[in-house]
Amino acid sequence: MVNFSTSLVLALSAIAVSAVPLEKRIAQTISASTQKWVAACNAAGGADQCSNISVTAFSTLLAAAGPCDQQNSADAMITLAKTLNNDPDMIKFAQIFAQQPRNTPTSESVQYCQQAPKNAELNGLFQCQFQGAKATTFVGGVAVGAAGTIPFGQTTPLSPAGSCPANPTGPIPDGQQLSDITQDPGLANVKGGSSAAAPPAASSAPPSASSAVAASSAAPPAASSAAPPAATTAVASSAAAAPPASTCAVKKRRGAMKKRIAQDTVASATPWEDACTKAGGADKCNPIAVTAFSTLLAAADPCAQQDSADAMIDLAKQLNNDADMIRLAQIFAQQPRNTPTSQAVVYCQKAPKNAELQGLFQCQFQGASQTTFVGGLAVGAPGTIPFGLTAAVSPAGSCPASPAGPISDGKQLVDITQQPKATGGAAAAGGDNSATGGAADCAEE
């Protein structure tokens, strides 16, 4: 009996393990996919058009996007580049973006677009797959060889499976950005093609932002931010002895002006979208969620986040006042926004549409300066005190859902609490969730 039981356990374990790839979501910080293109676009003079195209583009990496949406966005990137003196960096990064793996909800490969691109610069290009995705099965259980499993223009399955012209040796690590792996679009690897349509080699690539965001395999994609790439943070002192407190403080202040704080923005709205789908919101859920997570980007309007939370609640009220949707919208309204400079982000200065959002405002991230807001604003200046309050937030960086202080950089408030407002005596006077000061903090800079 013991041997039988052991065998049974092992057999069940094997079945469970084999089932994991069909259930595991493979995600990424989607906004990171367009950061280098946005930097090149801004440098070329694209102004507001850069961010608008970027947000649409990185949204096409979501699992729910159409198979050709990514290519269409790459076309839009190149079309704008051609109006800006055929900017070679913009074209190069658009070509690389067109090959960035898409999120997969089931750890199966993602189907390929089956139409020709608008711009010749994209001919023969298609997305890589993530290493964790099954090479023999595509989303929906589609076997290799079926429609959509072979890139447009080709007649046989890819070899190696999961590869793309920019990464011809195979798929790329889960959650990684192709633009961080290579600066070569791989046009020479296009079957039957040539690099004739390629732009001249770019002289240099824009500096890459150092992101603090880690995509969770259990959480949806990451979107992160379309904000301009930031400079790298100050390097830690290598001295064996801890520096004086005054030196540490100076270093931290300098770092705070340079370090960008980002997050997996898509994860902020995904729980609401799941609740919306469950409540019967159907195809109304995703557009609201996509708009919502974009409002956490550094370039977003201060009230855009609240407006999206209002839209979430408006739909919830149409769906029998769904309690989960309303609660998650209230939590979303308090999620910290990205900051390009490690300074606190200004607050919305208007009343929300729905009473359920009254008195709610976003927390700040722990790594942000709590005494200076983006643009160098001192506490007390317009925008540095939440709407409806007359004094600065105390503790600084807190919000009703996290009254003890700011939350860890890159964390989702919905992963920390399920309550829009703390109850009882949860908020200790003067409490603070931020990292403690001292030499250790200085060393971490």
Image (spheres, helix red, strand yellow):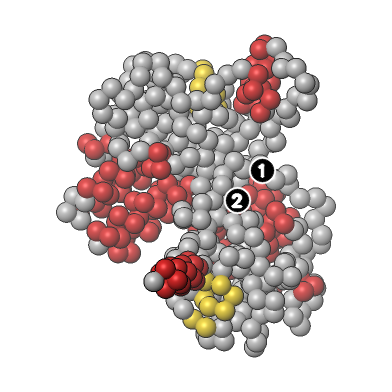
- Pick the front one: 40 or 358: 358
Quarter that holds the C terminus: top right
Which amino acid type is shown beneath numbered disc 1? Answer: Ala
Q: Residue at x 16, y 54 (%)?
A: 320
Q: Position of residue 187 (x, y in %)?
A: 76, 71
Outermost residue to the front: 1
Residue underneath mark 1: 209
Q: Position of residue 178 (x, y in %)?
A: 67, 59
* 367 to the left or right of 169: left
- Pick the front one: 301 or 342: 342
Q: Position of residue 64 (x, y in %)?
A: 44, 65
Between discs 2 and 1, the one toward the N terminus: 2
* 66 to the left or right of 51: left
- Mark 2–mark 1 contact, CB under 8 Å? yes
- Asked whether the viewer can see residue 353, the reply is yes
* Numbered badge on residue 264: none
Q: Residue at x 61, y 79 (%)?
A: 151
- Label 1 crowd bin: few (<14), some (14–19), many (20+), radius 10 Å: some
Q: Residue at x 48, y 47 (%)?
A: 265
Q: CA distance from mark 2 to mark 1?
A: 8 Å
Quarter that holds the N terminus: bottom left
Count of numbered circles on the image: 2
| 303 shown above or below 134 | above
Q: Residue at x 65, y 87 (%)?
A: 156
Which amino acid type is shown beneath numbered disc 2? Answer: Ala
Q: Quadrant of residue 404?
A: top left
Residue underneath mark 2: 32
